[in-house]
Amino acid sequence: MRELILEKTAYTADQLSGNNLPQVALAGRSNVGKSSLINTLGQRRGLAKISSTPGKTRSINFYLVKPENFYLVDLPGYGYAKRSKSERENWGLLIQGYLEDNPYLKSVVLLIDSRIPPQVMDMELAQYIRSLNLGLIPVLTKTDKCKQKQISDTSATWSGILGFSRGPVIFSSKTGKGKDTLWARILAGTGL
Ligand SMILES: Nc1nc2c(ncn2[C@@H]2O[C@H](COP(=O)(O)OP(=O)(O)O)[C@@H](O)[C@H]2O)c(=O)[nH]1
Ligand SMILES: [Mg+2]
């Protein structure tokens, strides 16, 4: 059985080196459902903390995936309005330091809230990921809260934006929908 083990937490750019295994990162706006998704993938509640106050996580967390031996890397959420300018700048520097010049990083899973239209920050991040020549795995979260019509509309809109023939993974942490598909795309995204 597959297992996720939280191996390292980095708060500053100089704590980011030394994780010499393939990496797939998870990125998305604060409150998009990233911690819940990690817990669903790891089949363990409390593996990643779920907070009712958004914008809490400021660290980069490295989860070792067994038995395949690669890292799922949880990036701090962005777009939290109550954060100060200097906090946003620190976020940018830490993320940039991680994403750029990282030969171990292969792909980024971009979490997108299925209930809202495409957000500028999400589209900008998607473009940035591609400019770095990284694989991009889009995931629509919280789809249990949406009608099928809304899911297919949002999915089609994102496919158009990204120019993908294959749409985003339709995911729900609540029901477990899309879990196997997401694992398959993550594993393919490691290049292992
Ligand atoms: N209905 C539903 N709620 C979800 C889902 N995923 C997350 N949530 C809720 O959304 C809120 C934010 O989730 P969290 O995982 O902490 O988001 P993060 O800030 O991106 O890590 C919490 O109240 C979760 O219970 C989902 O798939 N379905
Ligand atoms: Mg979180």
Image (cartoon, rainbow, N blue to C red):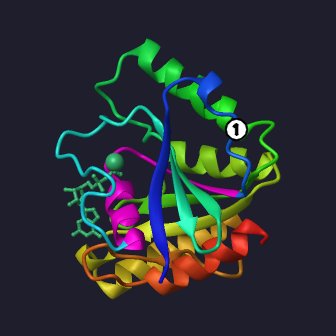
Rendered residue at 55%/58% (across/down): 64
Q: Residue furthest left?
A: 52
Rendered residue at 70%/38% (across/down): 18
Please report the bounds of the magenta region as a residue range: 23-42
* Residue 191, picture quadrant: bottom right
Vertical side of 112 occupied by 159: above or below:
below
Indicate left or right for 106 with 74 as reference: right
**Residue type for callout 1:** Gly
Residue 178's spot in the image, x, y percent? 44, 83
Residue position for label 1: 18
Q: Is residue 154 magenta?
A: no
Q: Residues within 10 Å of mark 1 (few under 14, many from 20)?
A: few
Q: Label 1's element?
A: loop
Rendered residue at 59%/50% (across/down): 123
Vertical side of 127 occupied by 163: above or below:
below
Residue 49's spot in the image, x, y percent? 27, 50
Vertical side of 34 occupied by 192: above or below:
below
Rendered residue at 46%/23% (across/down): 88
Q: Nearer the viewer, residue 171 or 58?
A: 58
Q: Is residue 36 magenta?
A: yes
Q: Nearer the viewer, residue 182 or 146?
A: 182
